[in-house]
Image (cartoon, rainbow, N blue to C red):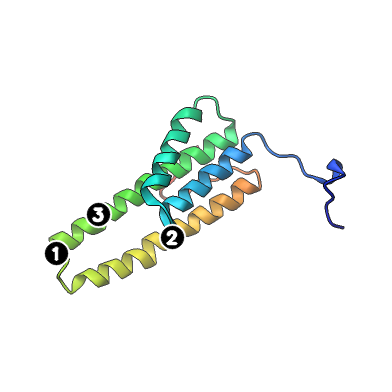
Amino acid sequence: MPHSVDNPDDWEPVAPGQGLAVTAEALYLINLLLLPVIAFITLLILYFRTITNAPTLAACHLRQTLSASLWAGFLLLAVNLIIVLTGGYQSANVWMLVIIYFTCCHATLVLLGVVGLAKAMAGQCYRFPLVGRDL
């Protein structure tokens, strides 16, 4: 039976902070896929403005997405440093490192973000494996 807008009893309750949690996860994915700097700055502003009085669900997702974003930035800088140390951008090793980075690291971070977004939309806390902060 489809849900009706006219009957509010058909809708499931929204967990406190769920909208903020979904926003944090969406900004994390936008940071990785569409607008890297702009989405990260927006996530930082959102984090510092709301973390002190955010509900538990929102605080969990804000902490996780900020931590994972910082790790993603660190990994990107590390790959660039390795490229420079192994012969620069004119070296044959560049494409090998870039392909390995995007296949392993970047794709994994995106997948974790999609799982985090699904958990936020379900109203559940989520800790990113390896790169997430302890709850």
- Residue 78 is labelled as 3
Looking at numbered disc 2 in the image, what kind of residue is underneath it?
Thr
Label 3, residues with CA under 10 Å away: few <14, some 14-19, many ≥20: few
Q: Which is more toward the observer, 94 or 38? A: 38
Label number found at residue 104: none
Assign a secondary structure to mark 3. helix
Is 31 left or right of 101, judged from the image as shown?
right
| Residue wearing tag 2 | 108
Q: Is residue 52 above or below residue 102?
A: above
Residue 93 on image: x %, y %: 20, 71
Q: Earlier in the sequence, mark 3 or mark 1?
A: 3
- Residue for badge 1: 88
Q: Position of residue 108 (x, y in %)?
A: 43, 60
Label 1 vs label 2, nearer the camera: 1
Q: Secondary structure at mark 2?
A: helix
Q: Earlier in the sequence, mark 3 or mark 2?
A: 3
Q: Is residue 52 above or below residue 90?
A: above
Mark 2 Cα-neighbour bin, 10 Å: few <14, some 14–19, many ≥20 = few
Front residue of 46/127: it is: 46
Q: Image check: 44 left or right of 16?
A: left
